[in-house]
Amino acid sequence: MPGEKKAQAPARPAPLERAGEAAFFDVDNTLMKGASLFHVARKMYERKAFTLRDAVGYAWKHAAFLFRGESLEDVRSIQSSALALAAGIRTADVATIGHEVYDEFIESRIWPGTKALAEQHLRVGRRVWLVTATPIEVASVISERLGLTGALGTVGEIEDGAYTGRLVGQILHGAAKASAVSGLAEREGLDLRRCWAYSDSRNDIPLLTLVGHPVAINPDIRLRAHANAHNWPIYDFRAGRRAATLGLKAATVGGALYGLWRGYARIRR
């Protein structure tokens, strides 16, 4: 009839938040392939924040990270180098670098399967946090760009808008992740027995055992054994590409050694 308004389809309701439930995701080798901090260092080198020697050191550590997996010694070594190089850098510059690194390097390295798991948690109303040794500025950018709830990361000390080269607290790695998540759960009213955690590394077993639903993603050998022994779900998004991946890792390390040898030969000449 004239003047009669057409009925409109009702708006789709937002998912009801599942009170007390959340999911926690590691970043390096769980959400993305490789170490996120390496790509930050790469971008900083492009901006001439440090020397070629420093860049070669980072490349070698990243190749080792890809080849043998994550270790606390590797994380501490990379973090201490990064902190020393970051001293005096403005926080505003790091925020800009974080977005550039995400667009140029990180986005293409995110495992689609892990991203889908995070999105599924969001769809049903669970909050999703990243928990990583990566600097909080970079972790926050990744979380923001993926539409997640937030991030927990390693915090650098800041004075007068610049980094001092010192940490606030400790590197968010291993047992420190479990402690940080426990603190977050207390602040946010989360029931950890109804929460999920995802990681690739044996170093995150303290975090995984803290929650009611631990999941191994792309696990290293020791985490895979632990997950099998405790009947934890395992997702390996490298399946079907393992031989090619191992070949690529070997080529990466071999290429790095060859490049270092050629550079040394030139210096001698």
Image (cartoon, rainbow, N blue to C red):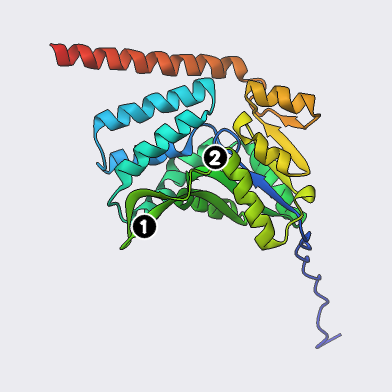
The reply to whether residue 41 is visible in this rendering is: no
Q: Residue furthest bottom?
A: 3
- Residue at left offset 45%, top offset 22%: 64
Count of picture labels = 2
Badge 1 element: strand
Residue 58 in view (yes/no): yes
Q: Which mark is residue 173?
A: 2
Which numbered disc covers residue 158? 1
Mark 2: which secondary structure? loop
Q: Position of residue 4 (x, y in %)?
A: 83, 85
As drawn, the label of residue 38 is: none
Vertical position of residue 94 compared to residue 230: above or below? below
Q: Quadrant of residue 157?
A: bottom left
Q: Is residue 11 left or right of residue 72?
A: right
Q: Quadrant of the N terminus?
A: bottom right
The outermost residue toward the left is 269
Residue type beneath disc 1: Ile
At x 35%, y 37%, the residue is 81
Q: Quarter of the image containing the C terminus?
A: top left
**In the foreground, 47 or 67:** 67
Residue type at numbered disc 2: His
Can you give x and y, in whole percent of width and height, for residue 82 in the image? 36, 40
x then y, percent, for residue 93:
33, 54
Label 2 Cα crowd, 10 Å radius (few <14 / some 14-19 / many 20+): many
